[in-house]
Amino acid sequence: MQPMLGDLELQHVQEVTTYEQRALPEHKPPGMSGSILQNLGRRPTRLVVHGVASGDGASDFAGKLEDTFRAAQPVAFTADIIADAKIDQVLIDDLQLKDVAGHPNRFDYTLILREFIKPKEPADTSALDSSIADEAKSLASNLVGALGNAGPFATGLEPFVGTFSGLLTRLQTFKQSLS
């Protein structure tokens, strides 16, 4: 079975590499010898797919691959090699297309795919205190209003620019006179 990315059959796949990583932070509690490892699960699996597209449809294939990359949407991915990993959808993190010199209608391609894990729906927030959000909105609106006064404040400092511009030079001279 040919690897498929959405409805696009990946041509002449030469290599599929998977990268999986588990998140295991180490904690060293005070007063204890040793440490504790916390299992935070795994990060999304990354796949690197190398292949070659050749023939009359190679430029169309490269264009479709680039369009899929630019859409930045999760797409279905199927390949025999990762069937047991249960990866259904992926995002294209990186796409590299190379036009092979001396061979018309031949492109080397490299895809870096990241497993797409659908975000969980937020928990029920009805029990939260809504006055906190209202207070935050009030503070933010006050801050925006205060930013309107920044222009007059900056222009009010103009008379002091001459006085403070030579301050560093005067301090350096004073330091040298002490040495």
Image: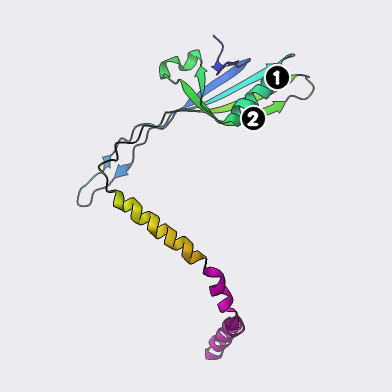
Q: Position of residue 174 (x, y in %)?
A: 55, 88
Give the residues drawn in magenta, as a range: 149-178
What kind of element bears circle 1?
A: helix
* Relative to 146, residue 49 above or below: above
Local secondary structure at mark 2: strand
Q: Earlier in the sequence, mark 1 or mark 2?
A: 1
- Left or right? Give the position of 54 relative to 125: right
Mark 2 nearby-residue class (10 Å; few <14, some 14–19, many ≥20): few
- Measured in 3D between alpha carbons, the distance from the residue under mark 1 to the one under mark 2, in whole angstroms, is 15 Å
User: What amino acid does circle 2 point to?
Assistant: Gln
Foreground residue among 168 and 89: 89
**Which one is nearer the viewer's eye here, 96 or 66?**
66
Disc 1 crowd rating (10 Å Cα; few below 14, some 14-19, many 20+) is few
Q: Main secondary structure of the magenta part?
A: helix
Q: Which mark is residue 96?
A: 2
Residue 136 as seen in the image, left or right of residue 146:
left
Q: Which residue is at 64% across, 27% downward?
A: 66
Q: Quadrant of residue 71?
A: top right
Position of 92 relative to 143 (above/below): above
Q: Split into 4 quadrants, where in the image is the N terminus?
A: top right
Q: How many marks?
A: 2
Residue ID at (37%, 36%):
23
Name which quarter of the figure residue 35 lies in. top left
Callout 1 amino acid: Asp
Query: Which of the 4 quarters of the picture holds residue 141?
Result: bottom left
Residue at the image point whose x is 28% and y is 40% from the top: 126
Numbered circle sitting on residue 60: 1
Residue drawn at x 57%, y 81% as measured from the top left: 168
